[in-house]
Image: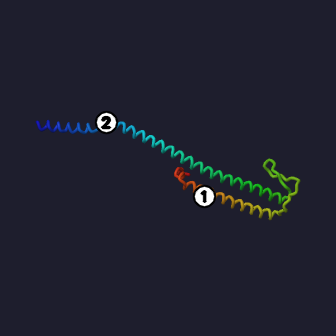
Amino acid sequence: MAEKKDKKEVAVQEQDDFRTNNLVDETGLVEAAMADLKKDKDEEKKREIKNAIGVATYHNAKTRAELRARRREDEITKKKLDGTKKLLERLIGFETEIKDGCLVPTKNKCKEPSLTPVEYKDEKKKLQEEISKEIRESDKLLDKDLREIRSSYEGRYQYWWD
């Protein structure tokens, strides 16, 4: 019976050792844990700010590149509008002005040489090819700019669908 009591006492003593080892009774450990928590919070806030700056910088650069492309396209469109107006003037032999979104002939004679309907179609085709070439060049510039932005440091902050 004494053996049973000794075994029980040893078992209870071992359980008490485990429990004693798990107790948090040192104030230094609590203070260190609190300091670690504060440090982790600060690191997380720093990471969030860094991400926000990277995303904003990336999107601003991308938006500027797209804006430059739109401005180039606006210039190309103006050139196309002016070109088609001049070709029409040469075909009909009179200058035109825009009224309510339509080209209306004026009484002034066109200063440039006149065109036949066949020449008009040929010139219009040339103008369209020239405009298409300029649009392709503009698209290539935009593509190059976007590749540069995506391969920059800020490019790592782009979304996967971008």
Q: Amino acid at mark 2?
A: Glu
Q: Residues within 10 Å of mark 1 (few under 14, many from 20)?
A: few
**102, 22: nearer the viewer:** 22
Q: CA distance from mark 2 to mark 1?
A: 61 Å
- Quadrant position of residue 15: top left
- The label number, if any, that marks residue 144 in the structure image: 1
- Left or right of 60, for residue 117: right
- Quadrant position of residue 16: top left
- The label number, if any, that marks residue 26 in the structure image: 2
Q: Are marks 2 and 1 in contact (CB under 8 Å)?
A: no
Where does the image place residue 44, in percent across and percent down from the top left? 46, 43
Of circles 2 and 1, which is in front?
2
Where does the image place residue 129, in percent across and percent down from the top left? 71, 62
Q: Secondary structure at mark 2?
A: loop
Residue at x 88% of width, y 57% of height: 109
Where does the image place residue 62, in percent across and percent down from the top left? 60, 51
Determine whether 127 is above or below 52 in the image. below
